[in-house]
Amino acid sequence: MEVWYGAEQVPASLSAPGGPGTVVTMGIFDGVHRGHQAVLGRVVELSDELARDGERPLAVAVTFDPHPRSVHQPDLDLPLITSLTDRLASLGDIGLDAVLVITYTLDFAAQSPQDFARTWLENLLGARAVVVGDDVRFGCHNSGDAATLEQIGRADGFAVEIVSKIRSQQGRRWSSTWIRQCLKEGNMGQAHQVLGRPHRLRGVVVRGLRRGRELGFPTANLEAATAGVVPPDGVYAGWLVRGSGADGGGQRLPAAISIGTNPTFDDVPQRTVEAHVLGRADLNLYGEEVGIELVERLRPMLAFDGLDPLLAQMRTDIEDTARILGVPVPDPIRPEDVTAQ
């Protein structure tokens, strides 16, 4: 999948006379949840249906960075459910040909719905068809909706398809709000259902207090404040993902993940995300950007009366994590065998 960061990277041939054009959708796609996936999947299907003489329009999504709410309400603390890196990887998994990332500014937001559609969708991308959900909003003050888009399409000659009733079997609309509620409650199973995959945090591995390596549990530490939407304190089973960029892929390693300040000790002043990769004493991750996928919450964060009960619980956490992830239970790691940097 190609990623275009700005209009200057979009091939001029797309909208040229006789060019392939596009089937396009637009949105923030925070989380790329099942509702988003229904719309995006239809974009891919329709591009295939509109192919002629061996040439098909490109399936394209338009997204925005930073999040519009952070531009209009800069004092609002709204961490993204999904980082841009992981958002692009998930969009690529659906089968899109390209994503256009538009830098969102107040000037950009001042465009009328008509100006946005004609400047970006028609003149730049050569839209032959536009696919959106029935709750679409676009243009200045979100004044454009599905009906507006249909009016523009009729006037300018591109097709508009509205995907409606994008809901769970229980009748609830798939939404980023629902995901945030699940994460606030620590309900990783429900979050997985709405997202269609485990919730992922992302950040750069930083140096911690190195206590884990001294106990035989070396960890990769991420600052919770920079990791994304972080669920409640506790211990989770999940995966550490290395080398996963906008093109997807990456190495997934089973991990027991601790979120919080570790109340057994009094020298951890802020929340951290720590991931111990099962059975690995040799990983060198400092300075590397990694993803942390959270599969299931094992327990809340607890304070222990000394090291022995803490170590016993950590070993239980390792065994529970291996069981949940379906991987072998690793042998204990001796502190002297830890070579991870």
Image: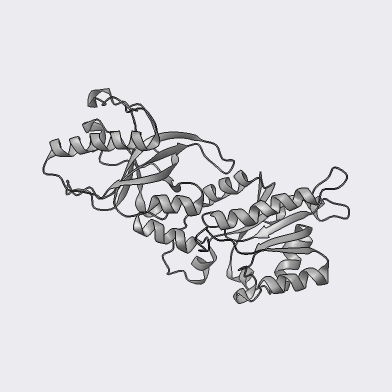
**Residue at (76, 54) in percent of width and height:** 22
Of the pair 75 and 152, the residue shown nearer to us: 152
Count numbered badges in the picture.
0
**Left or right placement of residue 123 versus residue 254 in this view:** right
- In the image, residue 133 lies at what x, y percent? 63, 64
- In the image, residue 195 lies at what x, y percent? 50, 52
Residue lying farthest left?
305
Of the pair 272 and 252, the residue shown nearer to us: 252
**Left or right placement of residue 327 versus residue 263 in this view:** right
Quadrant in the picture for the N terminus: top right
Q: Measured along the vertical axis of the image, is residue 328 above or below residue 9?
A: above
- In the image, residue 262 lies at what x, y percent? 22, 47
Image quadrant where residue 315 sits: top left
Residue lying farthest front?
170
How was the colour assigned to the protein in this rendering?
one colour
Image quadrant where residue 209 sits: top left
Q: Measured along the vertical axis of the image, is residue 83 above or below residue 337?
A: below
Of the pair 265 and 166, the residue shown nearer to us: 166
**Left or right placement of residue 135 versus residue 147 in this view:** left
- In the image, residue 287 lies at what x, y percent? 41, 39
Is residue 164 shown to the viewer in this render? Answer: yes
Q: Measured along the vertical axis of the image, is residue 252 above or below residue 12?
A: above
**Residue at (66, 45) in percent of width and height:** 95
**Residue at (53, 48) in percent of width and height:** 85
